[in-house]
Amino acid sequence: MKPNEEPESAAVRGIKEELGSVIDAETE
């Protein structure tokens, strides 16, 4: 996580990454 990144932004990014992984798994 970047030092200047807000905790909310990091959390949202993490959620998006998890959703992306789920979508990738479903499309295989």
Image (cartoon, helix red, strand yellow):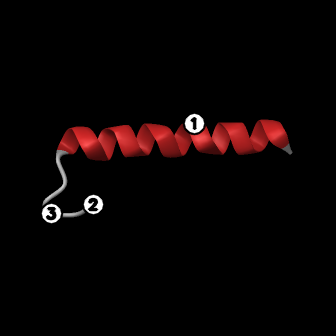
Pinpoint residue 11: horizontal percent, then vertical percent.
32, 40
Whole-number angstrom distance, CA of label 1 to CA of label 3:
24 Å
Is the residue under label 2 in contact with that under label 3 (CB below 8 Å)?
A: yes
The correct choice, above or below, for 1 with respect to 6 in the image is: below
Q: What residue does disc 3 label?
A: 3
Q: Is disc 2 placed on a helix, strand or loop?
A: loop
Q: Which mark is residue 28?
A: none
Q: What residue does disc 2 label?
A: 1
Q: Which amino acid does label 1 sit on?
A: Leu
Whole-number angstrom distance, CA of label 3 to CA of label 2:
6 Å
Is the residue under label 3 in contact with that under label 1 (CB below 8 Å)?
A: no
Left of 28 or right of it: where is 1?
Answer: left
Left of 16 or right of it: where is 23?
Answer: right
Q: Is disc 1 placed on a helix, strand or loop?
A: helix
Q: Residue 19 carries which label?
A: 1
Density class for disc 1 (Cα within 10 Å; few <14, some 14-19, many ≥20) is: few
